[in-house]
Image (spheres, rainbow, N blue to C red):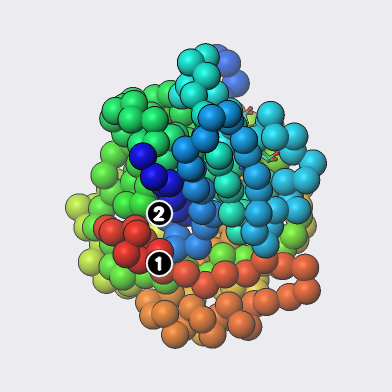
Amino acid sequence: MTAVTEFAPAKINLTLHVLGKRGDGYHLLESLVVFAGAGDRLTVEPADGLSFEVTGPNAAALADTPDTDNLVLKAAQLLDDGAGRGARIILDKHLPVAAGIGGGSADCAAALRALNALWGLGHTPAALAEMGLALGADVPVCVHAPTPKIMSGIGERIAAAPGLPDLWCVLANPGAPVPTGPVFKALDAPPATRDSDTFWPGSLPSPQALTRFLGTCRNDLEPAARALVPEVSATLQALAATKGCLLARMSGSGATCFGLYATETAAAAAAKAVRRDGWWVEAAKVLGEGIKAQAG
Ligand SMILES: C[C@@](CO)(OP(=O)(O)O)[C@H](O)COP(=O)(O)OP(=O)(O)OC[C@H]1O[C@@H](n2ccc(N)nc2=O)[C@H](O)[C@@H]1O
Ligand SMILES: Nc1ncnc2c1ncn2[C@@H]1O[C@H](COP(=O)(O)OP(=O)(O)O)[C@@H](O)[C@H]1O
């Protein structure tokens, strides 16, 4: 078997509704999730022992995360299940860490997919997603990347999303890491548990239809994140002020916010306008079918 490379795209929660809380403290969510053509890249090569290296422009953001805590190595251990298989694993890190765009979960999912192939284990995507849930609530949806998905439960229920028009996004992170747990803890009152909050249309064929629909939805974690990290408000304002911005909203538990655009040109111009010292800003295509073709 030769080397396997998997793209680990940034996850964007276009909507994120908190529908309740489980007995173990995990929150029940309903979220329209899409993936961006910006992300990390994970390569696995045949080797006798297991080794792990991090390279790339955001490698330094993982300097405080011991390799044993890295979700990539945790995925390798989970999949190997004590058999002692080897692999040289290289993570090319582009995404900011603790940023609400699921970088760790995307890497974890990419590791599950890549090692499943390298080791010839034959697990289905559904089986990998079920295993991955033990490592993070966002891992199942990332295993099923890159097509848009409706995610529910705590993250384990994945369904096809409505058809979306061609879309581009700008991801903007103000450089303030936000751990997910404290944002959920800061939610005002746990909501009463309900099954669904949203009437899902069959398709949202135009940017106008999409904008109208998203306007009826929310990110319920946004107020809590804004209170913990004031930079979120400035990031949203900067995106909302760009020409052609259809919607500006925070992703996940923050602090990354996204703007949506109907054209690549509008997204590129917006990224230029939003860029500030210390911020991470990327314009990218919102991915549909064919991740490898689109992600280059
Ligand atoms: C909020 C979301 C939305 O997509 O994204 P991020 O902000 O992390 O990107 C996810 O639900 C995050 O998933 P993930 O980051 O994998 O969460 P985990 O590691 O499993 O959990 C971290 C902590 O967040 C809280 N948590 C997480 C998920 C959930 N459905 N309910 C929760 O209450 C719990 O306190 C948990 O201890
Ligand atoms: N490969 C990885 N990339 C990013 N973070 C990781 C990784 N492995 C473990 N982590 C840990 O997971 C935490 C959450 O990171 P991340 O997935 O980037 O954020 P979020 O869940 O907000 O989208 C970080 O604080 C980091 O210590």
User: Identity of the amino acid at label 1?
Assistant: Gly
Could you say where residue 138 lies in the image, as x and y percent from the top left?
49, 37
- Ligand 2, by image quadrant, is top right
At a point 55% along the width and 39% down the height, the residue shown is 88
At a point 60% along the width and 21% down the height, the residue shown is 25
> Which mark lies nearer to you, 2 or 1?
1
Location of the N terminus (image quadrant): top left
SS under mark 1 = loop
Residue 114 circle label: none
Q: Is residue 265 above or below residue 59?
A: below
Q: Is mark 1 within 8 Å of ligand 2?
A: no
Q: Is residue 267 above or below residue 187?
A: below
Task: Name the residue carrying label 1.
Answer: 296
Task: Name the residue carrying label 2.
Answer: 34
Q: Is residue 234 above or below residue 291?
A: below
Location of the C terminus (image quadrant): bottom left
User: Identity of the amino acid at label 2?
Assistant: Val
